[in-house]
Image (cartoon, rainbow, N blue to C red):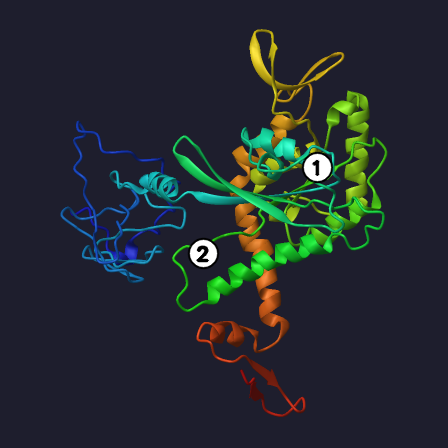
């Protein structure tokens, strides 16, 4: 008797279990790789579940369609989208591979491309003068990358208004090149009257979004748009041990929706461990009461694993840090530290400060996520706002590529038709 079950009495196929990872076929395997598809759609049809017998010699042919026609006398739905001859079945849980394809090499391909092109990372530092902003940046990247390290003079006076100054460096590690831009904000919070002193900073951040937006809508745009958008803002909090200043709260509230803010407590070695913990708890409570969300924001957690990891980070923030670009001998090892009358504060020692946690978080685990949140959340929010400000903005941006005078859209009444006005050059 034939093993093929007629279509009318064929049992409903069971959903196959999630397949294990399949590597390259073993040379000693006695089973030939049957059922491989010849795909116009570029796919491999999955083998049928064990509960459905298939005639010997059946084959599959993928066309990129949405159903299967069976040579074996049956019809099967293919969820992954493809014509298949034979009673093959594919579930949304994934298909069992019959041999090594090479999908996993995409990671290596991306790595090679990134190593060739490199990538950009733009970090802003803000806070009172004298909190060690430049020193901490140099310590983070273990090189003289801050503005003060490149031509700053000690005779330089505190500016009367907030200025925005940036300096860029290309740093390389393990064959990976990164263009690092450090944006400094000298003069912030150093005046007698600090009203609206955050406005130049907010303006600079939005200008970078606007620059990227204009490049993006150009007809003949560049293959790779230069990215000057601020991916992260380190906000330095004075180690008062009491509470946040009103300026701190106002700055973070105003800018938290346009840039990823990471608050840090500067010069943590000026406080005892107990004072530091109490101050951290007080700062977190004040930020929560003021409705200020710092990076990583809770609503951006993609899954439970992200939430678990980010919850630990949020509980440890703001990081109490110490920066130093000087080395000292400690127990026969050269370490970065600050020498005091009672000993040496080791910058990278987790028992002395939380610099190592900040570095691991900022560079080793969340650097790419900072860039993605900037592009997908902060920039998209700005982009949507600009394109919705008036009906003719999108046209104006496009026409600027052709040097056509801008237009504006208006109506004489709520029910009348639209009129287009072209400005004279």
Label number found at residue 244: none
**Residue at image coords 57%, 87%:** 421
The location of residue 127, given as percent across then percent down, is 73, 41
Mark 1 residue element? loop
Residue 420 in the image: above or below residue 39:
below
> Whole-percent x and y of residue 9?
29, 55
* Residue underneath mark 2: 225
Residue nearest the observer in this picture, 144 or 107: 144
Q: As rendered, which of 178 and 100 lies closer to the eye?
A: 178
Q: Cβ–Cβ below 8 Å for labels 1 and 2?
A: no
Outermost residue toward the left? 57
In depth, the one of 339 and 30 nearer the eye is 339
Q: Residues within 10 Å of mark 2 (few under 14, many from 20)?
A: few
Real-space Cα separation, disc 1 to disc 2, in angstroms: 38 Å
* Secondary structure of the residue carrying numbered label 2: loop
Measured from the top left, where is residue 223 in percent x and y? 38, 57
Kindly give the residue lying farthest to the front in the view shown. Answer: 155
Q: Residue at x 17, y 27 (%)?
A: 28
Q: Quadrant of residue 420?
A: bottom right
Q: Nearer the viewer, mark 1 or mark 2?
A: 1
Q: At which x and y percent is residue 75?
A: 27, 59
Decide which of tag 1 and tag 2 comes sooner along the chain.
1
Above or below: residue 94 compared with residue 416 = above
Assess disc 1: are there few (<14), some (14-19) or many (≥20) residues with their C-alpha within 10 Å of its C-alpha: few
Count up the numbered dots.
2
Q: Is residue 272 above or below residue 246?
A: above
Say which residue appears at 59% left-offset and 91% top-offset: 417
Front-most of residues 342 and 419: 342
User: Does residue 324 lie above or below 387 as drawn?
Assistant: above
Q: Is residue 320 left or right of residue 376?
A: right
Residue designated by label 1:
155
């Amino acid at each position: 008797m034939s093993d093929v079950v007629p279509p009318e009495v064929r049992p409903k196929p069971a959903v196959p279990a999630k397949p294990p990872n399949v590597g390259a076929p073993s040379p000693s395997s006695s089973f030939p790789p049957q059922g491989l598809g010849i795909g116009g759609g570029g796919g491999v049809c999955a083998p049928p579940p064990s509960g459905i017998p298939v005639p010997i010699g059946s084959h599959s042919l993928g066309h990129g369609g949405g159903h299967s026609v069976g040579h074996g006398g049956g019809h099967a739905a293919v969820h992954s989208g493809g014509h298949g001859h034979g009673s093959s079945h594919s579930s949304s849980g994934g298909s069992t591979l019959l041999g090594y394809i090479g999908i996993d090499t995409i990671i290596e391909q991306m790595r090679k491309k990134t190593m060739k092109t490199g990538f950009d990372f733009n970090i802003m530092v803000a806070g009172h003068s004298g909190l060690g902003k430049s020193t901490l940046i140099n310590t983070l990247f273990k090189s003289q990358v801050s503005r003060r390290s490149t031509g700053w003079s000690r005779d330089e006076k505190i500016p009367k208004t907030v200025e925005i100054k940036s300096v860029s460096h290309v740093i390389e590690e393990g064959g990976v090149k990164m263009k690092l831009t450090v944006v400094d904000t000298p003069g912030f919070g150093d005046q007698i009257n600090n009203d609206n002193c955050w406005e130049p900073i907010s303006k600079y951040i939005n200008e970078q979004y606007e620059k990227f937006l204009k490049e993006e809508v150009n007809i003949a745009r560049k293959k790779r748009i230069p990215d000057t958008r601020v991916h992260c803002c380190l906000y330095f909090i004075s180690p008062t041990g009491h509470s946040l200043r009103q300026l701190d709260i106002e700055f973070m509230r105003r800018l938290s929706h346009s840039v990823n803010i990471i608050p840090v407590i500067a010069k943590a070695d000026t406080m005892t461990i107990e004072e530091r913990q109490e101050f951290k708890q007080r700062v977190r409570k004040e930020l929560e009461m003021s409705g200020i969300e710092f990076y990583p924001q809770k609503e951006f957690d993609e899954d439970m694993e992200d939430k678990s990891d980010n919850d630990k980070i949020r509980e440890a923030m703001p990081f109490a840090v110490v920066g130093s670009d000087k080395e000292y001998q400690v127990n026969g090892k050269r370490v970065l530290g600050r020498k005091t009358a009672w000993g040496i504060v080791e910058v990278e020692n987790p028992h002395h400060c939380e610099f190592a946690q900040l570095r691991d978080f900022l560079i080793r685990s969340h650097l790419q996520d900072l860039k993605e949140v900037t592009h997908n959340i902060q920039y998209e929010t700005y982009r949507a706002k600009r394109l919705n400000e008036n009906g003719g903005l999108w046209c104006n941006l496009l026409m600027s590529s052709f040097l056509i005078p801008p237009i504006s859209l208006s109506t004489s009444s709520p029910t009348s038709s639209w009129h287009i006005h072209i400005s004279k050059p």
